[in-house]
């Protein structure tokens, strides 16, 4: 088997279990969606898993359902994030892997965004990832080993009207992850970015994605996260068929415009169903954590 084939092949079930057995893995935003499914699959693969979420009631229930550790964690508050990691280590031992999953996705015309949602998006999706990576890396570098997996998005590679704030945030996560991986690699700590497509969670509630905008289930994304933990990669798309998005930055603008028009990406995020998206919008604004 060639090296290229070996690296591109998905790790087997046995390889994943061997790689994850007894590893301490922390997942933020773990009470629902991709985070919950990732925690589930990691636990089933033999890892010692702890989840954190700003919604204390939801994370307590999710952890009880899985039989794992669950704690309140506000990724926008350094003290809260640090206390969360410290408590996890007190309960489970040194953290081997941090999955920075917590994130929000506002949509709508750029001129309609207010200061609250702009700042919350960057505090959660970018600053939270940076702070969490730093807090975890400080622990990991001291031990000479560890892994950080940051959940980005294909939206960080494929810009679209109505998604400007989220596009910028996830592009930042992608480049931050690669730069940090290059910096920490010699210390024995790797950093990966997983780029999901639009996932069937609250993030796309109230959006008419249609047949030409592919969506995937949180279980599909979680499987890629788990395989990335088992076999470290700098960048992984979920699903892998979206890897063509790496070419988007160099595509001619006329092709991008045509692609957006054909797929309806030119308007789907500008025209959300406000009623269908109301509960999610309230939650990401911090008005309701249920």
Image (cartoon, rainbow, N blue to C red):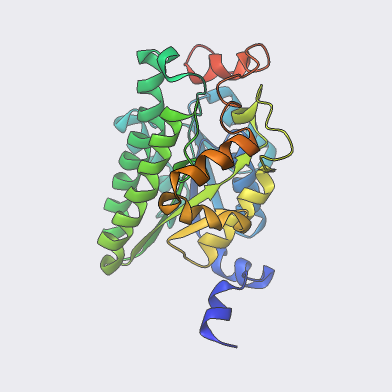
Can the viewer see residue 44? yes
- Residue 50: where, in percent of width, then height? 52, 44
In the image, 82: left or right of 229?
left
Q: Residue furthest bottom?
A: 1
- Residue 16: where, in percent of width, then height? 61, 67
Query: Dividing the image into 4 quarters, which one contains the C terminus?
Result: top right
Q: Residue furthest right?
A: 211
In the image, 21: left or right of 65?
left
Query: Dividing the image into 4 quarters, which one contains the N terminus?
Result: bottom right
- Residue 271: where, in percent of width, then height? 60, 19
Can the viewer see residue 47? no
- Residue 285: where, in percent of width, then height? 47, 16
**Front-most of residues 15 and 21:** 15
Q: Going 38% across and 60% down the picture, which residue do you hit? A: 146
Compared with 3, 23 (above or below) is: above
Q: Going 53% across and 75% down the picture, which residue do you hit? A: 7
**Front-most of residues 47 and 39:** 39
């Amino acid at each position: 088997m060639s090296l290229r084939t070996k690296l591109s092949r998905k790790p087997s079930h046995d390889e994943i279990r061997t790689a994850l057995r007894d590893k301490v893995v922390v997942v933020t935003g773990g009470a629902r969606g991709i985070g919950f499914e990732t925690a589930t699959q990691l636990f089933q693969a033999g890892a010692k898993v702890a989840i954190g979420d700003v919604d204390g009631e939801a994370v307590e229930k999710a952890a009880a359902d899985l039989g794992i550790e669950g704690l309140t964690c506000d990724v926008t508050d350094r003290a809260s994030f640090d206390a969360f990691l410290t408590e996890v280590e007190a309960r489970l031992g040194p953290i081997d892997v941090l999955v920075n999953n917590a994130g929000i996705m506002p949509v709508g015309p750029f001129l309609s965004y207010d200061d609250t949602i702009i700042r919350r998006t960057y505090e959660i999706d970018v600053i939270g990832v940076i702070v969490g990576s730093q807090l975890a890396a400080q622990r990991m570098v001291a031990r000479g080993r560890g892994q950080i997996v940051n959940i980005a998005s294909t939206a960080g590679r494929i810009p679209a009207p109505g998604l400007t704030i989220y596009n910028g945030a996830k592009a930042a996560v992608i480049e931050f992850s690669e730069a940090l991986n290059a910096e920490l690699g010699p210390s024995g700590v790797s950093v990966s970015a997983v780029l999901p497509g639009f996932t069937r969670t609250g993030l796309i509630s109230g959006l008419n994605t249609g047949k030409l905008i592919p969506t995937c289930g949180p279980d599909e994304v979680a499987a890629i996260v788990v395989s990335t933990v088992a076999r470290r990669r700098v960048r992984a798309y979920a699903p892998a068929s979206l890897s063509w998005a790496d070419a988007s930055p160099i595509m001619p603008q006329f092709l991008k415009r045509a692609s957006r028009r054909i797929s309806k990406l030119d308007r789907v995020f500008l025209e959300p169903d406000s009623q269908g998206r109301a509960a999610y919008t309230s939650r990401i604004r911090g008005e309701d954590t249920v």
